[in-house]
Image (cartoon, rainbow, N blue to C red):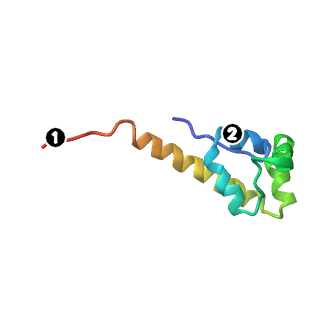
């Protein structure tokens, strides 16, 4: 399976919708809750690089963490295609 790559040119809202596991990454870097209110509105138009600059976050660190989270989620889903049950 091809790796998903989040780039700085992607809109925050699209990333949150496509990869919900990234929500905690944004929050851990100091971003506000972008699921509701005015921040949700701005997330629809704001690109990740711009959001990082507004919140004084190094874009490279944020992007690395976002991509790490989706990579881990992808690997975990590949490891659990169907759990085998053994009968004794």
Can you give x and y, in whole percent of width and height, for residue 41 in the image?
A: 85, 43
Give percent across and percent down for residue 23.
67, 51
Q: Is residue 16 left or right of residue 46?
A: left
Q: Secondary structure at mark 1?
A: loop
Q: Residue furthest front?
A: 37
Q: Is 80 situated above or below 33? A: above
Query: Badge 1, how many Cα within 10 Å: few under 14, some, many 20+?
Result: few
Where residue 59 appears, as percent x and y from the top left, is 77, 57
Question: Can you identify the residue that label 2 sits on?
Answer: 17
80 left or right, relative to 48: left
Q: Is residue 85 above or below residue 59?
A: above
Q: Residue at x 85, y 58 (%)?
A: 53
Image x and y of residue 48, in percent: 79, 49
What residue do we see at 82% from left, 40% from top?
44
Total numbered badges shown on the rendered structure: 2
Q: Name the residue that disc number 1 marks.
A: 87
Residue placed most toward the observer, 37 or 7 = 37
Question: Observer-nearest residue: 34 or 51?
Answer: 34
Mark 1 and mark 2: Cα distance apart in space: 40 Å
**Quadrant (top left, top right, bottom left, bottom right) of the C terminus:** top left
Q: Residue at x 27, y 39 (%)?
A: 84
| Image quadrant where residue 55 sits | bottom right
């Amino acid at each position: 399976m091809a790796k998903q790559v989040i780039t700085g040119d992607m809109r925050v809202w699209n990333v949150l919708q496509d990869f919900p596991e990234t929500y905690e990454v944004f929050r851990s870097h100091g971003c506000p809750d972008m699921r509701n209110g005015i921040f949700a509105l701005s997330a629809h138009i704001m690109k990740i690089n711009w959001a990082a600059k507004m919140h004084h976050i190094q874009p490279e660190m944020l992007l690395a963490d976002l991509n790490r989270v989706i990579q881990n989620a992808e690997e975990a889903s590949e490891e659990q295609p169907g759990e085998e049950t053994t009968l004794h």
